[in-house]
Amino acid sequence: MGLILDSSILIAAERGRFDLPTLFQSRPDEAFFIAAITASELLHGVQRADTPERREQRSSRVEAILQKLPVIDFDLTTARRHAVLWADLQARRQLIGPHDMLIAATALERGYELTTLNHDEFARVQGVTVVDVRPFVIQKV
């Protein structure tokens, strides 16, 4: 089975608010992935850096993530799943963010679980299993 990491997890880990190594260790037989849109979100964060130094730091972190975690492409099969999901959420008046819909469609199509700090958003998507990551959140005092 696989586990898709949402950008909220990766950003929280970068900020010292999520224990990503312990999550990996807690699921030793699991394959971890990111969706293509998550790669775009991370790369967008690099482009938005307010100083050249911060851009370089973010770029190094993001490139390390992209080297470590396989990126799942958004293909036609996933696009079809996304269209059905979008119509369902719209009909139920339960829309979620457009990037989150792409991530959810990717998870559904592959049969993978999802990790996110935006649990309430993804809980609206029928069929997506959202892993409880609260034990890995680092509370800042």
Image (cartoon, grey):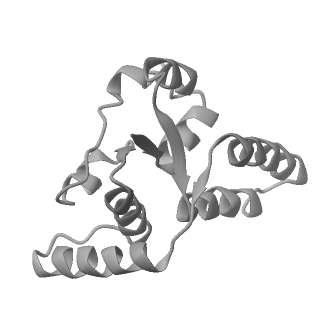
Instruction: Check the picture and name the quadrant holding the N terminus.
Output: top left
User: What residue lies at 51% left-to-right and 71% top-to-bottom?
Assistant: 74
Residue 63: x %, y % from top left? 77, 48
Q: Is residue 82 left or right of residue 69?
A: left
Q: Is residue 127 left or right of residue 117?
A: left
Q: Is residue 105 left or right of residue 45?
A: left
Q: Number of callouts in the render?
A: 0
Identify which residue, 109 or 20, lies in the foreground.
109
Identify which residue, 137 or 123, lies in the foreground.
123
User: What residue lies at 86% left-to-right and 48% top-to-bottom?
Assistant: 56
Image quadrant in which you'd find residue 139: top left
User: What residue lies at 54% left-to-right and 27% top-to-bottom?
Assistant: 20
Image vertical order of residue 138 relative to residue 14, above or below:
above
Residue 58: x %, y % from top left? 76, 47
Image vertical order of residue 16 relative to residue 83, above or below:
above
Image quadrant in which you'd find residue 89: bottom left
User: What residue lies at 50% left-to-right and 75% top-to-bottom?
Assistant: 75
Identify which residue, 113 or 57, lies in the foreground.
113
Residue 86: x %, y % from top left? 27, 78
Residue 114: x %, y % from top left? 37, 46
